[in-house]
Amino acid sequence: MKVLGTLFLIMLYHLTFSQLTNLVTKDKDDYYEEYSVLETDKKVKHGSYIKLKKGFFGGYALMTIGNYANGQKDGYWENYYAKSNNIKEKGYYKNDLRDSIWVLYYPERDSKDLIEVKSNKGISIQVVDANPVVCKSGKYKNDTITGVWQYYDETGQHTHSYDHDSGAVTFMRNQNNQNSENYNAGFIEGEYLFRQYLSEVFDFEGLMNSINTKIHLEPGKLTFKFTINENGLVDDLHCTEQTISNKKMYARATETIQSLNGHLYPKKLNGTYQSEVKTITFALDTESNTSWSNSGRVRSSETSMNFYLKISMDN
């Protein structure tokens, strides 16, 4: 049995870093939180911390575990993907800032179970059969990415390394698992995080909430061509296909692509950096939800249309 993550929920002693602390628990409808505060100032967190998400049908899922020192995040922390007990990232804080080594993981296919383990120090929560795959790893200094970071695909294969200080690819795997001198332009953090980045920056849910509900939307798409130049910057951005007429959606799409500056590396061919044309499509589609009701002999239905967005990039 593989186990990942341990934090004591019940402590026999609340003496941390030579300062007396009191245990605080918050048992809310949707989450459970536990941490310690200083006896001399009950607003200041000091010591171990845990937060769990409550399931709709019962049970708990890990959200965050870590440690505070005099009100600031300090030492080792773990964050988890929502409701799955799959670890998302782990690393260290110093004076409330990310510091030293951090590792980010791909979400696992299946949710994991939590178990309680008793010891002479109290009761700990552990994740059963965790087997996460590393997505990226490297160092932070004062909350800023620094030095060479390693990036991996969803099978755990090392794909490339990038020096964030010099702004250059230092390793790019080829088909023979050797360092390649030739490669296409791309997103520094890899394909999986590229899709995640585009989705988060576009913020489709937030955009839909800002659009007047009286405006009629139809399925369609926006396709843009642009160049990643020899410096890894976005150039010559223009729309090549537009079947979505909403101005807010068009503006959000262009802003999302322009935000890629600083997140891209250029194409390299025979030792020379070159520009490369890319295409990104924002496709808007719908899915219907139908609810039925009975009133005497009359049967009626109400159908609502939910929009969703798919973002894809091609060479």
Image (tube, rainbow, N blue to C red):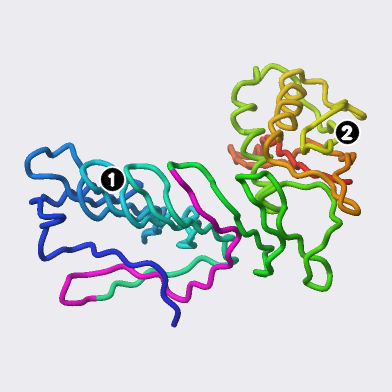
Identify the mark at residue 225; answer none if there is no mark: 2
The correct choice, above or below, for 185 with respect to 77 in the image is: above
Image position of 83 (left or right of 259): left
Q: x, y (%) of residue 81?
A: 50, 55
The correct choice, above or below, for 213 with respect to 285 in the image is: above
Image position of 151 (left or right of 124): right
Q: Which residue is mark 1?
A: 28
Foreground residue, 146 or 191?
A: 146
Q: Name the image quarter holding the N terminus.
A: bottom left
**Residue 18 placement: quadrant:** bottom left
N-terminal of the pair, mark 1 or mark 2, is 1
Give the residue type at disc 2: Lys
User: How would you rate the neighbour count of disc 2 (Cα within 10 Å): few for under 14, some for 14-19, many for 20 or more?
Assistant: many
**Residue 161 placement: quadrant:** bottom right
Give the residue type at disc 1: Lys
Q: x, y (%) of residue 168?
A: 71, 48
Q: Where are the magenta residues, as a range?
A: 118-141
Identify the mark at residue 190; answer none if there is no mark: none
| Residue sitting at x 67%, y 33% | 202
Q: Nearer the viewer, mark 1 or mark 2?
A: 2
